[in-house]
Amino acid sequence: MNASKILNQLLQQAGGQSMGSQRGGGGADINGLLGGFSRQLGGGGGTGSAQQGGGLGLDMKSLLGGGALGLLVGSKRGRKLGGKALKYGALVGVGALALKAWQNAQGANNAAPADGQPMERLADQPRERRSLELLQAMIMAARADGHIDDQERALITEQIDALGADQELHAWTERQLREPLDAQALAAQVDSPQAAREVYLVSVAVVNEQNPMERAWLDQLARALALPKEVVDELERLGRDEATGVP
């Protein structure tokens, strides 16, 4: 499957710019990403720092541009993070932000846990596997409110095909859009605690936490992933702040 290619293009839809300019070799500049998030999440810059376009985040006027990601996280029903614009940083820097959540929960700034590499540091097969895990998490989270109908399923599949999905990924996407939601099955695909944090973070980015069904999905997923409560709280706080433009 070519999951990494498709995920990268979905992230481009969220961010409106190429991931290629941020990567060198197999991964992004993790220190640069973390530095940008630190500035946005209280490490410097005024109240407008996350909204001025100079960091990793887009300003709040930059809504999703449609396409497959737009169909996944926002629909005619207004399922778009409680009506807020989805921020670039919450998804494009998913590995760095998930790591930041762990550091905050541990009170260990700049520490590197020995429990898996952030998405941005992966290459080749490990990156492909992580991409598939994150795509699966995004699709399941988008379905958590029970409102994706046959027409929307077909549109999502068509949009992912348009991004260049191969036949294997096409068939996989169709299965993910129809199989019963199963947090335990999703958790079983996760290959490390870092991956678990990233899976939860992309799920937070997609759902509307004010919707009871979507809130229940997050709770099930946190239990299935065996995430500590303090890490869950930080992932939700950072994901929410990235979505609402809190610096």
Image (cartoon, rainbow, N blue to C red):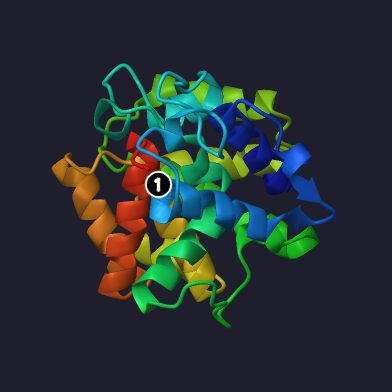
Considering the image in quadrants, where does the C terminus appear?
Answer: top left
Tell whether 14 sits left or right of 138.
right
For residue 190, above or below residue 130: below
Q: Is residue 189 visible?
A: no
SS class, disc 1 = helix
- Residue, x 40% and y 42% (percent of image)? 242
Q: Is residue 54 visible?
A: yes
- Residue, x 34% and y 44% (percent of image)? 241
According to the picture, the residue beneath numbered tag 1 turns out to be 140
Quick one: 167 or 2, which is closer to the camera? 2
Given the image, on which type of amino acid does mark 1 rest? Met
Residue 145: percent from left, percent from top: 25, 38
Disc 1: CA contacts within 10 A as few (<14), some (14-19) or many (>=20)? many
Quick one: 113 or 130, which is closer to the camera? 113
For residue 235, above or below residue 79: below
Residue 126: percent from left, percent from top: 71, 65
- Residue, x 50% and y 19% (percent of image)? 66
